[in-house]
């Protein structure tokens, strides 16, 4: 029986490169984007994410490399003929036009017959919940409503791909989260391919099926939010995506490391780490358990759990939990979380036991310490 040939990706970036004089904004990126997926480009300012998006849109020309759509190069195709929708942070609405006419504008310039045009506009107005605002001008709308108009305008002519560059960046936190939920549901209903740019980690995690993390013009992490968070491929990703603790340790034989004259277990992470090497051991704060010496004495240590001692410097109340700032004997700092009812047992100045499961730690080369500083 012949196995069906897998479908080719919708968009392929091949050794995509963009230089401005001596500065390399995008450095030989390779990436495949599947039809119907929600992919987010995540990175700090100047990391290359928006430049990559602009090259896909056709607003920037690559210095080298190629962009393929259905295996055909987009490089010679002007931006207005690529069939790609675009939504920016600034809504760019026509102030003299109604909501209905703003949304219908892309159909007008494509000379879509009036009956069909009005039908499409009415459908998209309903989809973005703006039917009651169809005859208003942009000045009469809230920021969230304006962004819905911009999204509707980009979707009305049914592009294969929707590009979004920090579209919710100008909105307040609550409204931004509400629109993130709406956008995720809109993507699910339409099945359109969305490539989204943001510097907001929470937004990327909330929206995306996959995240591409950019640093210095390169993609240094690619995968689902869950995979990137739980098993970061490098120290930069571990530090950039969420909060992390890093301990300086030295590898030993038999899947172990030495920390302050104490042996800790590594588990599976030891397979790719050479012996007698200075490395960084990473643990997420939520995977750390902070116990008073009295409580720890009543809870035997399991074989797959590491334990070190530290002193509590400060605790901060966060409702159900407290965060604990800790310092070890050698001056290394880390943060853990404590259930609120146990707070009195680990107050500032208390010596505590810090425990974590072996499976919750990752190991990275010592040189990655520079990357941690950049991500922080």
Image: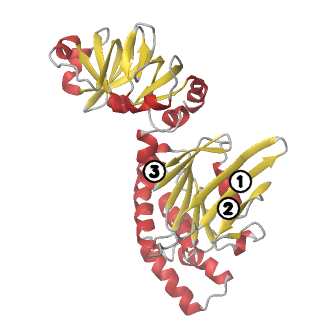
- The reply to whether callout 3 and callout 1 are in contact (CB within 8 Å) is no
- Residue 375 to residue 369: above or below: below
Q: Nearer the viewer, residue 196 or 141?
A: 196
Please give the name of the residue rendered at 67% of the width and 42% of the height, measured from the top-left corner: 46
Q: Nearer the viewer, mark 2 or mark 3?
A: 3
Check whether the beta carbons of the residues at disc 2 and disc 3 lie within 8 A of each other. no
Residue 56, label in figure: 2
Q: Which residue is mark 1?
A: 15
- From the image, state whether disc 1 or disc 2 is nearer to you: 1
Q: Residue 158 placed where, x, y %?
A: 55, 77
Q: Which callout, 2 or 3, points at the residue further toward the start of the chain?
A: 2
Q: Secondary structure at mark 1?
A: strand
Residue 172 can be seen in this image: no
Asked whether, in this view, residue 261 is left or right of residue 342, the answer is: right
Q: Residues within 10 Å of mark 1 (few under 14, many from 20)?
A: some
Tell us which disc is closer to us: 3 or 1.
1
Q: Is residue 199 above or below residue 3?
A: above
Q: Residue furthest right?
A: 21
Crowding at mark 3 (Cα within 10 Å: few <14, some 14-19, many 20+): some
Q: Write down the residue under mark 3.
A: 224
First reached walking from the N terminus: tag 1 or tag 2: 1
Percent from the top left, x then y, of residue 176? 45, 52
Of residues 167 and 174, the one nearer the viewer is 167
Q: CA distance from mark 2 to mark 3?
A: 22 Å
Question: Could you say whether the residue bearing mark 3 is in a helix, strand or loop?
Answer: loop
The CA span between labels 3 and 1 is 22 Å
Q: Quadrant of residue 349?
A: top left
Foreground residue among 238 and 374: 238
Inspect this view and state whether residue 111 appears. Answer: yes
Q: Earlier in the sequence, mark 3 or mark 1?
A: 1
């Amino acid at each position: 029986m012949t196995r069906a040939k897998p479908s080719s990706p919708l968009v392929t970036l091949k050794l995509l490169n963009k230089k401005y004089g001596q500065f390399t904004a995008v450095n030989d990126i390779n990436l495949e984007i599947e039809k119907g997926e929600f992919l987010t480009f995540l990175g700090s300012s100047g990391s290359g994410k928006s430049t990559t998006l602009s090259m896909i849109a056709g607003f920037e020309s690559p210095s080298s490399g190629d962009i393929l759509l259905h295996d055909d190069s987009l490089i010679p195709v002007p931006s207005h003929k690529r069939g790609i929708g675009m939504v920016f942070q600034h809504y760019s609405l026509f102030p003299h036009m109604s909501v209905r006419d703003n949304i219908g504008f892309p159909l007008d310039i494509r000379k879509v017959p009036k009956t069909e045009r009005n039908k499409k506009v009415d459908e998209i107005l309903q989809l973005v919940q703006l039917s009651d605002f169809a005859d208003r001008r942009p000045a009469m709308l809230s920021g969230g409503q304006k962004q819905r108009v911009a999204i509707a305008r980009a979707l009305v002519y049914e592009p294969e791909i929707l590009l979004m560059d920090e579209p919710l960046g100008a909105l307040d936190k609550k409204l931004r989260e509400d629109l993130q939920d709406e956008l995720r549901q809109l993507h699910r209903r339409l099945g359109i391919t969305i490539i989204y740019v943001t510097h907001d980690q929470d937004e990327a995690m909330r929206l995306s099926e996959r995240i591409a993390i950019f640093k210095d013009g390169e993609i240094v992490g690619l995968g689902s939010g869950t995979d990137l968070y739980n098993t970061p491929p490098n120290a930069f990703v571990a530090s950039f995506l969420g909060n992390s603790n890093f301990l300086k340790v030295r590898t030993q034989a038999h899947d172990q490391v030495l920390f302050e004259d104490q042996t800790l277990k590594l588990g599976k992470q030891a397979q790719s780490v050479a012996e007698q090497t200075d490395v960084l051991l990473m643990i997420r704060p939520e995977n750390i358990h902070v116990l008073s010496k009295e409580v720890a004495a009543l809870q035997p240590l399991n074989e797959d759990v590491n334990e070190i001692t530290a002193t509590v410097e400060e605790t901060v109340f966060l409702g159900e939990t407290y965060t604990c700032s800790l310092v070890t004997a050698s001056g290394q700092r880390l943060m853990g979380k404590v259930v609120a009812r146990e707070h009195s047992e680990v107050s500032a100045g208390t010596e505590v036991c810090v425990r974590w499961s072996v499976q919750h730690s990752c190991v990275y080369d010592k040189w990655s310490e520079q990357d941690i500083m950049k991500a922080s």
